[in-house]
Image (spheres, coloured by chain):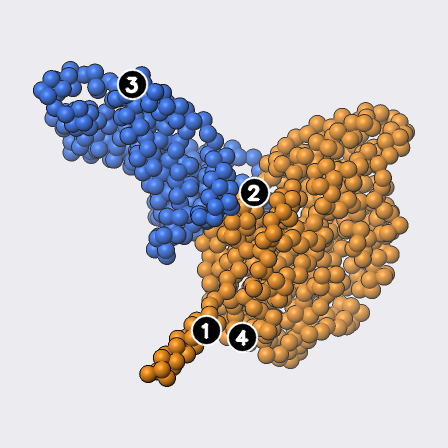
Amino acid sequence: MLTYLIRRIAIIIPTLFFVSIIIFGLQQLLPGDPALALAGEERDPQVIAFLRHKYHLDEPLPVRYELWLGGVLRGDLGESIRINKPVLDLVLEKLPVTAELAGMAILVALFIGIPAGVISAVKNGTFIDYGANVFALWGLSTPNFWLGFLLILLFSVDLGVLPASGFVPPGEDLGKNLATLVMPAFVLGNAIAAVMMRHTRSAMLQVLSADYVRTARAKGLEERTVVLKHGLRNALIPVVTLGALEFGQLLSGAVLTEQVFTIPGFGKLIVDAVFNRDYAVVQGVVLCTATAYIVLNLCADIAYFLVNPRLRA
Amino acid sequence: MKGIKVAVFAGAMLAASAGIASAETTLKIGLAEDPDILDPTLARTFVGRIVFASLCDKLFDITPDLKIVGQLATGYKWVDDNKGLVITLRTGVQFQDGEPMNAAAVKYSLNRHLTMQGSTRKGEIASVQSIDVVDDHTVKLTLSAPFSPLLAALADRAGMIVSPKAAEALGDKFGTAPVCAGPYKFVERVAQDRIVVAKFDNYWDKGKVHVDKIVFQPIPDNAVRVANLRSGGLDFIERVAPTDLAQIKGDGKLKVTTIGEIGYQGITVNVDNGPQSKNPLGQNARIRQALSLSIDRAALNQAIFNGEYIPGNQWVGPSNPYYAKGLPVPQRDIAKAKALLKEAGVEHPSFTLMVPNNTEAQQVGQIVQSMAAEAGFDIKLQATEFASSLKLATEGQMQAFQIGWSGRVDPDGNIYNFVACGAPLNDGHYCNADVDKELKAARAIDDPAERLKHYTAAAEILLKDLPIIYLYHRQWIYAYNTKVEGFTPYPDGLIRPQGLMLK
């Protein structure tokens, strides 16, 4: 396992280097002039020239890439032209918000998706199974922003029990923090729960028809023990992968959900930065989320080892 | 025993009332965008000015009917044939860090606007050659040439006076913790989440400040902003969409206030900016006149904005003192439009109209397209993301561009940079020496009646040449909780906290 880990960690560096080139290069394809976009509506030529010079927008691409990469290696992700704030500060400010939202969404997905998948597999072909499949389809089909609006109208405007938008840090008021994240976490988790339910169901169906499960039943074990201890444990392997991948995707920012609920996370940050051509912010945030995604994949692989004893051999 | 009980009860009541009296009032305002840098010298967005209205007082301010009045200044006088402006400052004013606001601070701030690298204020007060401290509460600005719009510029960000001590300490990071002389002091900012300001106890006009804290929350989506107001998450929202008015007016807990903007929305035509101008619309004023006549501005306003906005045909609105009343908003006249096209020899002109890719702008584009088609126009709509459209417009990669302007108090701010030869916002590269002459003459005098004559003369030419076809002026629509009182709307769209109260 140690050799495997070392090998995986060693691959991270060239992967990130490649990712940095992609991020930097793709941004240059965006139409528009960042200095012009960020100079304000007066479009003062002196301000435009100043911004171009200060942020090296008048340098050739390779020079700009080298300057940016050099900064990244020194821990300097650059500065937001729009609000004059270091990108690293913005990342550290937004990461906990998005991480908490992503974590809560995954929890919602796990609490809904896995039990639904297990029950659906155990009650395969029954009304319960069909109902769970309909729920999965609904979860996959429902647009996040639409569901978000409906929840706001119901719980915030009509019932007045939850705040419509915004974010309160957990350190400031845990109750309000959870209240601000309940709806967005449900919106995000709902869609992932549907996917998890389908994966869990498929994996359980496969596992429950395996010989060792038949043996366990023949030995007279309770059905609950057969399903949860012998079946689910093996069926969890693909679900673990899915969970890690989905968490990584959520970390890159659930753009629409963050816009609807005005959650100041990565998604909102990136969208605004793209529209404002705030290059440094886009580059810094995407690089951070790519790193997080790669690390999470590694964690998923490590989790495999822990969950499946056969892989440890 | 009974006496002790009464005393205990009285004590409890006193403590409770003291608690109630000291309960902090917080006003939560929903903004349509996240402000940019909170530094008056470097700031570039309209929404930032809303926050500045709480943080940073200016030398001058405006009244709701666009008169210029003193704020940090108590008076002014033009001297030296209007090449000098002597400003008398208010005494006893402090910055939020306790430093005195005086002539030295004004000189410092204006020099900062003029000389700081990347200053977006430099162009606004470029006519100022030097600033002299006459005494502790008097400054004299010497101008390179008479420039009457300077007063209006000093009633905006260029007139905001910052604490020299704080500005020296923070340099170009001043925006992270601004210190000015406004009614509220900066507390904290979380990008895209909130800006918090708290009452400044030593504000010079503190009698008008009743709310202890203001929290500005950027919520770009119109529907979400309204939902927050209706749910009580916000107390006040700005830039309400006309289409949301019905649900707000139907809610007994909310109030609406409106005022016409000082800006405009229109279509800028490429008349001489590169090869894309070489088309009938760009080359022939009669075709542009025909386009203008084919648009029913009142119907457009009714269809898209439920009649809430104001049809327009000039760079200032019909109620503006500098509106040329002899040139009213034209009625739609398809017959005349067709006659003009026939006269021009192009009965079915075709062009591409670049339109910002937001719902409202696209609806306007579609209605213009449909109305103009009746006169014979073939308009193709090109929905373009805003940052891309700016580049295309400045490079002349467009034939016509549907774009507006947020507006400036002085009419010069709405016209000069857009139509003067070589001006920075003149995307269509229109150039007419007679128009330049009138606009420059209007800049050099300060008598409003005389200035109106020059603007009227310019309008007579511009409404024939039509390098910009003005369509309408928006209303600033504010919605707020009934517990908010004392709000006065201003045409510049800013939310002034003075007078605001929470019941």
For marks 2 and 1, give the CA distance: 39 Å
For marks 4 and 3, give the CA distance: 73 Å
Tag 4 subunit: B
Disc 3 and disc 1 in contact, CB within 8 angstroms = no
Tell me, for residue A124, which label it has, or none: 3
* Number of residues whose C-alpha sits closer than 10 Å to that of mark 1, classed few (under 14), some (14–19) or many (20 or more): few
Q: Residue at x 67, y 67 (%)?
A: B60
Mark 2 against mark 1, which lies toward the viewer?
A: 1
Give amino acid for label 3: Asn
Residue B332 location, x and y as percent?
A: 84, 36
Find numbered disc 1 in the image and state the secondary structure of the residue it sits on: helix
Q: Residue A275 is drawn in which quadrant?
A: top right
Q: Which comes before the other along the chain, label 2 or label 1?
A: 1
Q: Residue at x 75, y 73 (%)?
A: B77
The chain assigned the colour blue in the figure is A
Q: Label 1: which residue?
A: B17
Do dots 2 and 3 share one subunit?
no
Return the residue found at the far left: A219
Q: Can residue B111 be seen in this snapshot? A: no
Give amino acid for label 4: Asn
Do dots 2 and 1 share one subunit?
yes
Give amino acid for label 2: Ala
Q: Residue A188 is drawn in which quadrant?
A: top left
Disc 4 and disc 1 in contact, CB within 8 angstroms = no
Tag 3 subunit: A
Find numbered disc 2 in the image and state the secondary structure of the residue it sits on: helix
